[in-house]
Amino acid sequence: MRHFPAGAGSAAIAFSLAIARAVPASAETTVWNFNMFGPPRAVTVSIETMAEFYKKESNGDLEIKIAYGAALGPERQVPESIKSGGYEAGMMCAGYYPNKFPLLTVMELPFLPPRNIADNAKVYQAVLNHPLIVKEMAERWNVKYLGPSFLPAFEFMGNKRIASVDDMKGVKMRIVGLNAKALQAFGAVPTMVTAPEGYEALQRGTIDSFGFPYAYTFGAYRLHEVSKFVTEGIAMSGFLCFSGVSQTAWNKLPDTLKAKLQQAQDLASAALFKAYKAEDDKWIPIFKQKLEVTQFPAAERAKLVAAASPVWEGWVKEQEAAGRPGRQILDFVKSEVSKYTH
């Protein structure tokens, strides 16, 4: 036991009590480990913005610790890892695991979301907050939607000139998931390679044209160095990505921080718009200098949109056959989309 000099006992006790009262009850920092695949880039400013916001609003009591390069585990295992408690949060894309978030893949149906990114972001938020989507995330994976990772529309870069649907015939095109079916209707050959494999695949001719969010990802992976052409005007939907957090971890937060989620998401969305604009300003002039930019006419895009409608209906049938409310979700998304210019 520590002893104080004579006469100092009362003062020491009073001082100790004052220190105890000065330390907040939540002095212990809560850390959310966040698994982010890929390096820091335009899309990562969303969670970076949210991490900074929550650190400030919690006076340092909540830290979202971002591990880039999928350092905490493979990106295809994020839902399982969150559910098992391996880490608290991470970036997920429905297309990486269509059987894990089946209803959410509605946003990856070809040419369904608005092509304007600001409009797309509004539909995106509405879908991720839909009660059936919230339920799917929570019941299957104990996941709660945390923050936005919406992407710009997809274009194609590579070594085949694509200025019409006829130009797609026989072309090995890297595109993901349900979008591939709309291109197959015109003879395209969907070929799936990962983003890090794109440079070598184009260089070797394994693929002819690579689909990516335009324009920042093409620059981030330097695909313009091994390409001759890039499209503008296809504006295809692609991955539906988002940041998710363990519902268990979320429930432990004080209500004051929970109440700030919408504010944090709005800040993250604004940061994404700014980052994408800056990347467009940087990369599009470089592409125009280095490559032939082929404008894809509206009439040709309309043919792709028409070919997409059967894909939508096929998705509904698949969901309904599995006992899921596919028609209800698709009708909801179409209703939201109708509010904006498509």
Image (cartoon, rainbow, N blue to C red):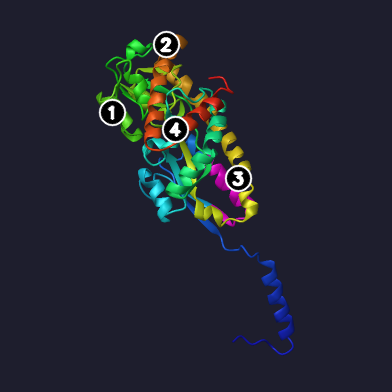
- Marks 1 and 3: CB-CB under 8 Å? no
Q: Position of residue 85 (x, y in %)?
A: 43, 56
Q: Nearer the viewer, residue 17 or 288?
A: 17
Q: Position of residue 70 (x, y in %)?
A: 39, 46
- Marks 3 and 2: CB-CB under 8 Å? no
Can you say whether 197 is above or below 304 in the image? below
Q: Marks 4 and 2, Cα distance to the nearest angstrom?
A: 29 Å
Q: Position of residue 185 (x, y in %)?
A: 33, 17
- Marks 4 and 3: CB-CB under 8 Å? no
Residue interval drawn in magenta: 46-63
| Mark 4 burial class by Cα count in 10 Å: few <14, some 14-19, many 20+ | many
- Marks 4 and 1: CB-CB under 8 Å? no
Q: Nearer the viewer, mark 4 or mark 1?
A: 4
Can you say whether 335 is above or below 137 in the image? above
Q: Mark 4 or mark 2: which comes first in sequence? A: 2
Q: Mark 1 or mark 2: which comes first in sequence? A: 1
Q: Residue at x 53, y 28 (%)?
A: 120
Q: Residue at x 34, y 23 (%)?
A: 181
Q: On the image, numbered disc 1 is attached to which residue?
A: 201
Q: Nearer the viewer, mark 1 or mark 3?
A: 3
Q: Marks 4 and 3, Cα distance to the nearest angstrom?
A: 28 Å
